[in-house]
């Protein structure tokens, strides 16, 4: 097996594991639009990374954190609803990012960043994925009980001395890391699908939060491996093929969910 395929498989499985755990909270707390908005803002981070000659992953992480912090500040002003603010900020950041990239003398693979190119993942990207993914999973593991309790009932969580506001900020911070390290895999326009489809498919079979997270990781990993295989066989882009495989898994599991719940 060629080295670039091995790297692609390793990168894809890491993203599947991280997005499987993180995606459960995205589904439970209805944060899908926030994840999509973060991904849109990442294009501006890529442009800044090229301008400042720094790592694109670091630039995306910084821009995403700034985006999330600015959103929190605007939310506290209570001028507009959160979904309205997300729509304004996300598309404004995407537009400014595209304009900035167009004006740059140095050309970058815009298609690769928009739709992903897992087959070109290098050693640096694998290091970012390994370190960032491990950091996210460890923080989720150590805060799992509090995060689940907060998701089920915030008032009950506060009664149990859970710092809800701090955990909400933690989730947003972890989302920025997941988006930053995953863009190269499925792209800016498709990253939210990794955070939503696998957990949504797993939710149809799981009877506890922990089981749902494990199923989400498994479905994501299977879809990544299958997607890479089908992209070779059909000569299609790897990122969209992985997402299409995820969607197929969801479609297959959906009619089985009623039968599973009855048993």
Image (spheres, rainbow, N blue to C red):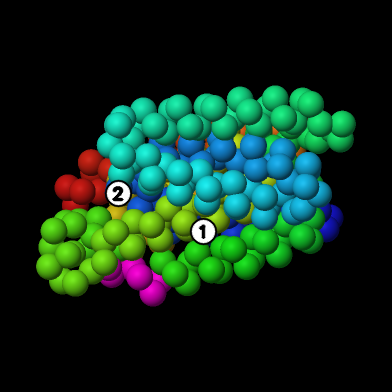
Question: Is the residue marked by circle 2 packed among few (<14), some (14-19), or many (20+) residues within 10 Å?
Answer: some
Q: Tell me, yes or no, whether the two marked residues, 1 and 2, touch with CB atoms within 8 Å.
A: no
Frontmost residue, 60 versus 237: 60
Q: What stretch is highlighted in magenta?
A: 141-146
Question: In percent of the image, x 72 and y 30: which residue is there?
Answer: 100
Residue 156 visible at all = yes
Q: Of the numbered discs in the image, which one, if any, rests on residue 28?
A: 2
Residue indicated by mark 1: 18
Frontmost residue, 80 versus 219: 80
Look at the numbered disc 1 and give the secondary structure of its residue: helix
Q: Of the numbered discs in the image, which one, if any, rests on residue 177?
A: none
Question: Is the residue marked by circle 1 packed among few (<14), some (14-19), or many (20+) residues within 10 Å?
Answer: many
- Estimate the x, y position of residue 232 in percent, counting from the top left: 74, 39
Q: Which of marks 1 and 2 is nearer the N terminus?
A: 1
Question: In percent of the image, x 67 and y 55: which residue is there?
Answer: 58
Q: In this view, does 105 lie to the left or right of 57?
A: right
Is 226 placed above or below 244 here? below
Q: Is residue 173 magenta?
A: no
- Estimate the x, y position of residue 161 in percent, counting from the top left: 19, 72
Residue sitting farthest toward the right: 105
Look at the numbered disc 2 and give the secondary structure of its residue: helix
Residues under labels 1 and 2: Cα distance?
Answer: 16 Å
Is 114 placed above or below 178 here? above
Is 84 placed above or below 166 here? above
Q: Is residue 9 left or right of residue 29?
A: right
- Estimate the x, y position of residue 39 in percent, counting from the top left: 55, 40
- Dividing the picture into quadrants, the one containing residue 101 is top right
- Estimate the x, y position of residue 32 in percent, counting from the top left: 40, 40
Q: Does the magenta stretch include residue 144?
A: yes
């Amino acid at each position: 097996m060629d080295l670039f395929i091995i790297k692609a498989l390793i990168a894809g499985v890491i993203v599947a594991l991280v997005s499987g755990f993180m995606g459960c909270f995205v589904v439970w707390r209805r944060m899908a639009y926030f994840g999509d908005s973060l991904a849109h803002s990442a294009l501006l981070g890529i442009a800044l990374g090229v301008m400042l000659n720094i790592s694109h992953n670091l630039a995306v992480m910084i821009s995403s954190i700034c985006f999330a912090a600015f959103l929190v500040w605007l939310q506290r002003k209570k001028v507009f609803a959160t979904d309205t603010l997300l729509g304004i900020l996300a598309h404004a950041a995407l537009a400014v990012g595209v304009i900035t990239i167009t004006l740059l003398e140095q050309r970058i693979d815009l298609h690769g960043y928009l739709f992903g190119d897992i087959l070109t993942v290098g050693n640096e990207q694998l290091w970012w994925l390994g370190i960032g993914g491990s950091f996210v999973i460890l923080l989720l593991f150590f805060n799992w009980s509090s995060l689940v309790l907060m998701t089920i009932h915030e008032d009950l969580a506060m009664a149990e001395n859970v710092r809800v506001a701090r955990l909400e900020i933690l989730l947003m911070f972890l989302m920025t890391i997941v988006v930053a390290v995953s863009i190269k895999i499925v792209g800016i326009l498709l990253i939210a699908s990794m955070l939503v489809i696998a957990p949504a498919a797993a939710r149809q079979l799981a009877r506890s939060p922990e089981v749902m997270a494990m199923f989400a990781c498994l479905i994501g990993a299977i879809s990544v491996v299958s997607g890479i295989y089908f992209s070779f066989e059909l000569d299609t882009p790897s990122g969209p093929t992985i997402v299409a495989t995820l969607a197929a898994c969801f479609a297959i599991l959906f009619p089985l969910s009623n039968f599973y719940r009855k048993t």
